[in-house]
Amino acid sequence: MKIFLWIAFLIIVIVAIFAVQNSAAPLITIRFLLWGFETSLVYVIFGSIGLGILLALLFRISGVLRASFRSKNSNQGFPSA
């Protein structure tokens, strides 16, 4: 667990350095279907990293809950000692 925290910290530092170096970049236009807006590259970087973290957490939580329900269901058939 400790190594995971160090790796996460290292990734956060790398993303922060990357975003600061690109803070002087011109505005970029984001378009999706009929929707579009202009924003800084830094916000796009942080938003995509945040969305990736959120999606990873959602998949992880669903996997943990599914495993928990499976272990509860498998233990119900056996009498407790």
Image: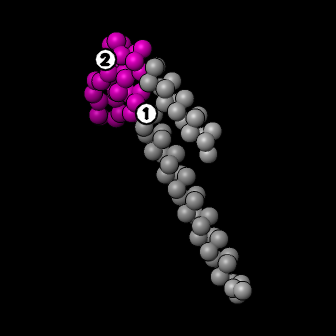
Q: Secondary structure at mark 1?
A: helix
* Classed neighbour count for the residue bearing mark 2: other residues with Cα under 10 Å, few (<14), some (14–19), many (≥20): few
Q: Residue at x 59, y 34 (%)?
A: 7
Decide which of 39, 74 is in the foreground and name it: 74
Measured in 3D between alpha carbons, the distance from the residue under mark 2 to the one under mark 1, in whole angstroms, is 16 Å
**Residue 24, position in %: x, y?**
34, 12
* Label 2 close to label 1 by CB (< 8 Å): no
Between disc 2 and disc 1, whose residue precedes? 2
Q: Residue at x 38, y 27 (%)?
A: 44
**Residue 51, position in %: x, y?**
43, 39
Given the image, on which type of amino acid does mark 2 rest?
Leu
Left or right? Give the position of 44 relative to 14: left
Q: Is residue 22 above or below residue 38?
A: above
Which residue is identified by label 2?
A: 27
Of the 4 image quadrants, the one containing the C terminus is: bottom right
Residue 23, label in figure: none
Which residue is identified by label 1?
A: 48
Which region is colored magenta?
19-48
Q: Is residue 10 above or below residue 65?
A: above
Q: Secondary structure at mark 2?
A: loop
Of the 4 image quadrants, the one containing the N terminus is: top right
Q: Residue furthest front?
A: 2
Q: Is residue 50 above or below residue 70?
A: above
Left or right? Give the position of 65 relative to 41: right
* Classed neighbour count for the residue bearing mark 1: other residues with Cα under 10 Å, few (<14), some (14–19), many (≥20): few
Given the image, on which type of amino acid does mark 1 rest?
Ser
Q: Per the image, is 20 magenta?
A: yes
